[in-house]
Image (tube, rainbow, N blue to C red):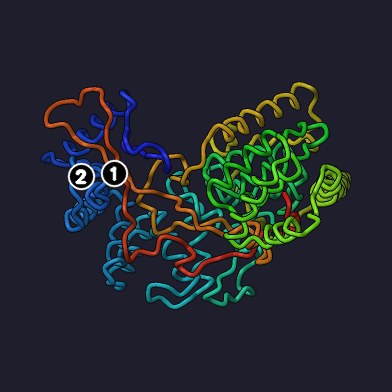
């Protein structure tokens, strides 16, 4: 075990005896392997990472020069991921020419991170290269084809581009050069979700909720994806789950106001204004508890302080000589209008799409195979879809016609993910597979969903995706006794852009969310 991550808000000490032992064993093994007469390339890379971050100073002090030497040695010994770190170091130092050269070397060697960085540079005209959309797309496809758990972003970004949902405020993209391909966009984003990339999981949850991106309406799949995204730190997924459980889904899962409040509390703990507003609303109406106007006002004030206009309106209404209070009747009407009706419309669209697909399939089978003079592209590879790793179970109730066993299994799988998400306290998202993987830090970015009008309710926060390793103290000799290990918080590099927002990247929002209460 090479990586240890301390969740934000938790104690700054590692106290688990097994983790203490494994941490020391792993770090000693890395340092020994890197210092041998024939050093292991991966060990050189990991030692360089330790020196770069200063995460474990009692094992390896922070030393930029030492880390660079290790990255160079690792790269020259065949560990291709080190080329990205070399390029990143040059970029931080301001030597753009050498940075681009290192990234190009990484591309030549097949490094996904280097390929992705250059793709974004050509897309947006960064690090001294001329914007070139066709070249950017070619590089991005190469990166997407080789994406892994450490670098899951490329297929997501490619999917957002192909679906027309990617935008940049700093650069005017020539969208006529970007093909619109919803089918490829869907499976690319699904691939990123399979690689446990939270924004992609959120996007798939949204798509199955509102029958977008070529997805059929499927409440269970939507909730599963949202739950996985929640476990990966996507605060908007928490609010999406809150909305689902506020009204439930007939035939799939019941309304559960306790879960609705739990997920809103998780999102509010991350200062999401819409979640803070929702908690005020829950206290005003009496959702999963007694009516408490004082608590409601406090939450409204907090949300208003974070720019939520709906909270300001509720505070004004409650401040009148005859306060305009909301009640359960208002709540039921609002839920029916803003949530249930929208999902019903999505189901209707989905049913119509399913009928069209069935008719097309029948017509094709009757017509028989046809010969084409043009070669057809092979279908994209379908990744396996294990429910517990990073993507939801894909058996659709609407398409499978599954019986009691399959529908029960799907509900059980969904509830397991929801329960796991509910148990997790608010935390800063870490690596795509739950590990801290600092090698891809400059490629961090927030989620890409759709419509500037949702900024009040769904802030496009660029949550840190990949964090530095925390710090443990090394004992003087031998293995450490079972004890608490202090963890030092990592400090962000001063000059490094740590989010795609800082790199000039945003996207359009997934939809205009006029469900302001929930």
> Count the marks: how many?
2
Q: Residue 150: x, y in percent?
A: 42, 46
SS label for mark 2: loop
Q: Residue 339: x, y in percent?
A: 79, 48
The one nearer the camera, 339 or 95, is 339
Disc 1 crowd, CA 10 A, few/some/many (<14, 14-19, 20+):
some
Left or right, 175 with respect to 82, comes to right
The residue tagged 2 is 57
The tag on residue 453 is none
288 is higher (above) or lower (below) than 466? above
Outermost residue, front side: 321
Left or right, 504 with respect to 101, comes to right
Quadrant for the N terminus in the image: top left
SS label for mark 1: loop
Q: CA distance from mark 1 to mark 2?
A: 9 Å
206 is higher (above) or lower (below) than 17? below
The one nearer the camera, 168 or 278, is 278
Say which label, 1 or 2, has the lower sequence index.
2
The residue tagged 1 is 488
97 is higher (above) or lower (below) than 6? below
Q: Which residue: 45% across, 39% down? A: 434
Q: Which residue: 63% across, 57% down? A: 458
The one nearer the camera, 158 or 485, is 485
Whether pointer 1 and pointer 2 mark residues with C-beta atoms closer than 8 Å, the reply is yes
Displayed quadrant of residue 112: bottom left
Q: Residue 3: x, y in percent?
A: 34, 39
Q: Which residue: 35% across, 50% down? A: 438
User: Can residue 369 be seen?
Assistant: no
Q: Residue 187: x, y in percent?
A: 63, 49
User: Can residue 429 be seen?
Assistant: yes
């Amino acid at each position: 075990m090479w990586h240890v991550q301390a969740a934000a808000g938790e104690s700054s000490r590692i106290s688990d005896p097994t983790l203490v032992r494994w941490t020391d064993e792993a770090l000693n093994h890395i340092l020994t392997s890197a210092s041998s007469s024939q050093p292991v390339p991966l060990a050189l890379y990991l030692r360089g990472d330790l020196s770069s971050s200063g995460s474990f100073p009692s094992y390896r002090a922070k030393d930029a020069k030492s880390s660079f030497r290790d990255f160079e040695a690792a790269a020259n010994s065949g560990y291709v991921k080190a080329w990205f770190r070399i390029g990143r170091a040059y970029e931080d130092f301001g030597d753009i020419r050498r940075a681009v050269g290192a990234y190009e070397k990484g591309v030549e060697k097949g490094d996904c991170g280097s390929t992705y960085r250059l793709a974004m540079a050509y897309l947006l005209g960064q690090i001294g290269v001329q914007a070139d959309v066709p070249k950017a797309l070619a590089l991005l496809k190469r990166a997407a084809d080789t994406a892994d758990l450490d670098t899951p972003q490329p297929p997501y970004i490619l999917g957002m581009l192909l679906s027309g949902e990617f935008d940049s405020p700093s650069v005017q993209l020539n969208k006529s050069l970007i093909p619109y391909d919803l089918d490829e966009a869907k499976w690319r984003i699904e691939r990123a979700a399979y690689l446990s990339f939270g924004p992609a999981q959120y996007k798939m949850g949204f798509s199955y909720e509102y029958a977008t991106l070529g997805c059929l309406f499927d409440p269970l799949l939507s909730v599963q994806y949202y739950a996985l995204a929640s476990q990966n730190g996507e605060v908007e997924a928490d609010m999406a789950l809150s909305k689902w459980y506020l009204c439930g889904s007939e035939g799939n899962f019941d309304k559960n106001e306790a879960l609705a409040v739990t997920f809103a509390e998780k999102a509010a703990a991350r200062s999401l204004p819409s979640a803070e507003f929702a908690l005020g609303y829950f206290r005003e109406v009496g959702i999963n508890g007694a009516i408490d106007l004082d608590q409601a006002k406090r939450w409204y004030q907090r949300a208003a302080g974070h720019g939520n206009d709906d909270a300001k309106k509720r505070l004004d209404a409650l401040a009148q000589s005859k306060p305009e209070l909301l009640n359960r009747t208002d709540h039921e009407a609002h839920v029916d209008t803003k949530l249930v009706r929208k999902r019903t419309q999505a189901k209707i669209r989905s049913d119509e799409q399913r009928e069209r697909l069935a008719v097309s399939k029948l017509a094709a089978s009757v017509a028989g195979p046809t010969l084409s003079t043009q070669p057809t592209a092979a279908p994209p590879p379908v990744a396996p879809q294990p429910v517990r790793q990073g993507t939801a179970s894909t058996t659709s109730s609407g398409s499978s016609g599954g019986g009691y066993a399959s529908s029960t299994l799907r509900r059980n799988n969904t509830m397991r993910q929801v329960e796991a998400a509910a148990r997790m306290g608010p935390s800063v998202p870490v690596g795509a597979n739950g590990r801290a993987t600092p090698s891809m830090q400059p490629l961090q970015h927030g989620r890409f969903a759709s419509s500037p009008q949702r900024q009040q309710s769904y802030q496009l926060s660029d949550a840190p995706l990949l964090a530095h390793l925390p710090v443990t103290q090394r004992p003087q000799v031998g293995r450490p006794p079972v004890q608490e290990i202090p963890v030092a918080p990592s400090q962000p590099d001063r000059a490094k852009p740590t989010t795609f927002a800082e790199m000039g990247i945003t996207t359009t929002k997934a939809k205009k969310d006029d469900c302001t209460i929930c």
